[in-house]
Image (cartoon, rainbow, N blue to C red):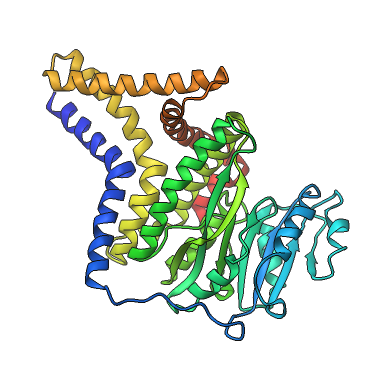
Amino acid sequence: MITLKILFWACLLIVFYTYLGYGILLYIIIRLKRFFTRNTREAAMPSDDELPTMTLMICAYNEEDVVAEKMKNTRALDYPKDKFHIMWVTDGSNDHTNELLAAYPEVDIVYSPERKGKTAALKHGLQSLKTRYVAFTDANTMINPGALREIARLFMDPTVGCVAGEKRVAAKTVGEMAAEGEGLYWRYESTLKKWDSELFSAMGAAGELYAMDPTLCRDVPDDALLDDFMMSMYVVQAGKRIAYTSDAYAMEYGSANLFEESKRKRRIAAGGLQSIWWLRSMLNPFRRPLVTFQYVSHRVLRWSITPIALVLLLITNMTIVLMGAERFYLITLGLQLLFYAMAFGGWLSYRRGRRNKLLYTVYYFVFMNLNVFRGMYYLRTHGRNGAWEKAKRS
């Protein structure tokens, strides 16, 4: 019984810390840091003459449907034309993407007929890079006009090697609960990234919009499922910071349904497990304790231990109650069962086309954690094709 209670409390603390405790602790630390460093000022926006040259790199595969909209958005970016380069990397595209891009004389098209995936396309594009900085974005995401200027401003800090923009998610139509759930998640995630960046460094960048000093770009394994995360975290591993800003943001539509969202979450979870192994040197607290603290608290726990702790929390609680423990454990079990009943209600309301944000938010939380297990299974079954085995050998 004592062992079960210890396991129960350990799991409860892990779950609480991962999803609430770290945010609370981070907020307290940030408030203390602001109190003791009140005179720090943000770098001023550089003038046009001071702005560095920058390439906007768009890796695309068969994106003919969004070329016109993306180029309209790109042309609207507020950045000196003589310092701004546009590069589309279209490896493997066999639709009309290249033909449509040929109508834009300012676009550099980097093309190879062989499709090897986004990671290989990024490497291909970087070989043709000629500017001081490079910003990465997706073909189906739209950037705010002042994004590149804000990114350039943050690069004025010599400790910054990467700038992460904010990802904003919109639903195409009212009632797309998958997209709305994802949007709620990203709002919370954006707050944590902002505080992480203020403490020392954001823990990773989203591929929708981030920029790098190309001298810090390292080769990401070709089978990396989270190339953007790996690319940005290599910067932290090299001793630089990832600065986060909500003033540079990319807007995209969320998944239209839970099936598509589930596939994406499974891929993210599998990629997260890959990344933990590849970045295992960052788990050593004796090298850079602050980085390890942020990395484990914000990333590693979510992608590995905490989903397992959630399952064990329910199992140990049920076992303790069946063994006749005090009333407190009966209450905690009732709360857990109520929580999962709400998650089921959220799934049921989604299936019936009804909208209940509270129930759906609970369901989305459970849904994300279930996909961590699906990610584990994905890596296990696809290890025969080299994705996981190669990660372990590197």
* Percent x, y of residue 153: 51, 75
User: Which residue lies at the image location 55% right of the left edge and 74% below the top edge?
Assistant: 152
In this picture, residue 340 sits left or right of residue 130: left
Q: Residue at x 44, y 52 (%)?
A: 190
Question: In the picture, which quadrant includes the N terminus?
Answer: top left
In this view of the protein, can residue 379 be seen by the observer?
Answer: no
Residue 335 point in image, percent of width and height = 27, 22
State the residue in front, 323 or 73: 73
In the depicted structure, whether residue 277 falls above or below residue 175: below
Q: Give the answer, above or below, for where 180 lies relative to 274.
A: above
Q: How many marks?
A: 0
Position in image of residue 263 (x %, y %) = 59, 35
Q: Is residue 18 visible?
A: yes
Foreground residue, 321 or 52?
52
Hey, which quadrant is residue 106 in on the image? Answer: bottom right
Q: Foreground residue, 3 or 20?
A: 20
Residue depicted at x 33% and y 42% = 19
Q: Is residue 206 above or below residue 1?
A: below
Whether residue 279 sits left or right of residue 326 in the image: it is right
Position of residue 84 measured from the top left corner of the image (x, y, whole percent): 69, 74
